[in-house]
Amino acid sequence: MALISRNAAKQIMMDVLSANLACSTSDLTHPGVTFHLAERREGAFRFPIREKSLQIVTVGQGAVVSCSSDRLDWVQGQLKQLTRGQIFSVRTLGTLDSYVRENDQTLAGPDQKYVCSSDDIVQFDVPRDIEIRLYDETNVSHLYSQSHFKHALAFRMDSPRPDRLAVTAECSGQIVGIAGASEDCERMWQIGVDVLPEHQGRGIGKAIVGTLARAIVDKGIVPYYSTEVSNIQSRQLAVSLGFWPAWTEVYAR
């Protein structure tokens, strides 16, 4: 069983984000705004870099902007004098959305990202009538017939971010919830979760996400969890298990 302290989890997160944004870790804690050309770096998340790219991230200090070369001058002109709060305001995000729509894109987010460590995972209860089962990469594909749990799994093992672990909740022999972990990069796996509507509000989501987070940490990997800032229920689930708000981002897609 591996242990990942909160400090270690934070450092891994900073290393991955800096690779993802093509910046330094010090840029992430810089109080101002820094701008960087998007490029593929070792250790980054395995999401594709679009030909027309734009991503903005804050870890709570300033903001880091990463974009394609053709967008750099315009983005700098719009954002270089703004504070973090102004950049993530509705007015500025609306301006950015209008800009990327010229290339048939939209601005996604803001998304809130949460991270957890061995130090932080809290105890949780499993509902009495629920059976929890853990799947690993050798048998997670057995769940691919459960296609209605679309937020939990990628449903393809040839994905650049393959499903590595999953936890199911079963009630009377029926799967009513799935939490899955995708290998978004070597050091951080993302958790997705789905619970059938008629079984929500019973603590099932907390039980399967908590079980999965422990299994990820036990492998020496940092679990992270993503949700829209407006999804209060999802954010409460993350916090209740010991995840902490780690970064916020918007991006063109």
Image (cartoon, grey):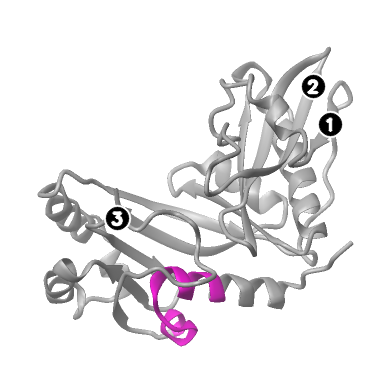
Q: Residue 118 — which label?
A: none
- The residue depicted at 31 percent of the width and 81 percent of the height is 34
Secondary structure at numbered mark 3: loop
Q: In front: mark 1 or mark 3?
A: 3
Q: How many marks?
A: 3
Instruction: Report, in whole angstroms, how far the alpha carbon at label 2 lies from the one at label 3.
Output: 39 Å
Over which residues does the magenta segment extend?
15-29
Q: Which residue is mark 3?
A: 50
Q: Which residue is mark 2?
A: 170
Instruction: Report, in whole angstroms, how far the alpha carbon at label 1 lies from the one at label 2.
Output: 7 Å
Q: Amino acid at mark 1?
A: Ile
- In this view, the residue in front, 157 or 244, is 157
- 102 left or right, relative to 118: left
Q: Which residue is mark 1?
A: 132
Q: Earlier in the sequence, mark 2 or mark 3?
A: 3
Q: Is residue 155 above or below residue 102?
A: above
- Asked if one can make out residue 59 in the rendered structure from this viewpoint, the answer is no
- 145 left or right, relative to 119: left
Q: Position of residue 231 (x, y in %)?
A: 48, 41
Q: Is residue 103 above or below residue 38?
A: above
Tell me the quarter of the picture where residue 205 sits. Answer: top right
Q: Position of residue 136 (x, y in %)?
A: 77, 41
- In this view, the residue in front, 110 or 99, is 99
- The residue depicted at 36 percent of the width and 50 percent of the height is 109
Q: Amino acid at mark 2?
A: Glu
Q: Within 10 Å of the Cα at label 2, are there few (<14), some (14-19), or many (20+) other Cα atoms?
A: some
Magenta: main secondary structure:
helix
Instruction: Report, in whole angstroms, how far the alpha carbon at label 1 lies from the one at label 3.
Output: 39 Å
